[in-house]
Image (tube, rainbow, N blue to C red):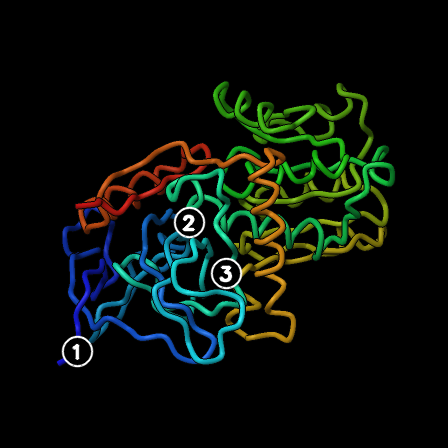
Amino acid sequence: MAEKMKAVGLYEYLPADNPKSLQDVEVDKPSAAGRDLLVEIKAVSVNPVDTKVRAPKEGQEDEPKILGWDASGIVRETGSEVTMFQPGDEVYYAGAVNRPGSNSEYHLVDERIVGRKPSALSFSEAAAVPLTTITAWEALFERMNIPRDKEENKDRSILMIGAAGGVGSIAVQLAAEAGLTVIGTASRKETEEWTRSHGADYVINHYENFREQLEKHGFQDVDYIFCMNATETHWESMSDVIKPQGKICTIVEAKENLNMNLIKNKSVSFLWEFMFTRPVYETEDMIRQHELLQEASQMFDDGTLKTTVTKKLSGLHGENMRKAHQILEEGRMIGKLVVEVQTQ
């Protein structure tokens, strides 16, 4: 008889305040094969992707669907093809959206998208950062091909829309470290302070005219724009202030068609970033996520980067996961929310 493990899963797609939306379940404990690691989960964090997958929609699941795409823990088993990790290693990763998630006692993940947990961070602090670090890193350095050379970037600027969120909190740090002039958007005193504390040189309000605010700070336009909130809402403003031959990258699907003609005469590049592309399609360069997590781990250890966890819940169970989803859906989170596994 298969060994069982506890998890949080869903059978129906329901509002987060419905007790049936995310439930305590028991499922078979998996075993590692191939390039997979079996990780004992110590902490997870909750991202907008979790709430989007859980959001009310038609359809039911015969087996519980387990969410969770951010985790830290300890490797307990390795598949026969694993070469980079061994049992006992402490790791952090974001997983793949097309596989069962990490809201469980144990979790299978491909070693090519796993990094060594930063030793300077607790499991909770580490669980807050993989998905957002991968997203920010890929958007800045791989999609927009921003050089990581302070001398090259000394006269270049980037506008980050939604700079106080999970991805923004890492992206601001990475861009500042690369030597860019960072302009973040925020609309509340606490989010403005958070954005500045993570390295933004200037902060503007995303509910007000971009050009007028930028000109007050001495900018006619910006070299890069990283959009992490409401792409269609800000599209005209982004098109207006992006520099000719500049680059715009977004992680937020548009709810309506974008008028690409607005950026045609400027020869502006428009780019998408979806951090699950590599693991879902098992691209030839899938191991890049391992490599960047390894490099980021060193940056967390030496203090170049800092964790972005701002709220913790203790106990990986249905009630806490429902609470976490509700908090995220309020749309006022600064940084990241982590759910710790309770130790006996």
Location of residue 113 in the rendering, given as x and y in whole percent from the top left corner: 52, 63
Give me the residue at 66% from left, 28% from top: 209
Q: Are marks 1 and 2 in contact (CB under 8 Å)?
A: no
Q: Quadrant of residue 304?
A: top right
Residue nearer the viewer, 150 or 59: 150
Q: Secondary structure at mark 2?
A: helix
Counting the numbered discs, the total is 3
Q: Is residue 172 above or below residue 143?
A: above
Determine whether, in the image, residue 13 is placed left or right of residue 2.
Answer: right
Identify residue type, mark 1.
Answer: Ala
Image mark for residue 319 = none
Identify residue type, mark 2.
Answer: Pro
Q: Residues within 10 Å of mark 2 (few under 14, many from 20)?
A: few
Q: Which residue is mark 3?
A: 114
Q: Which residue is mark 2?
A: 48
Q: Which residue is mark 1?
A: 2
Mark toward the start of the polypeptide (3 vs 1) = 1
Q: Nearer the viewer, mark 1 or mark 2?
A: 1
Identify residue type, mark 3.
Answer: Val
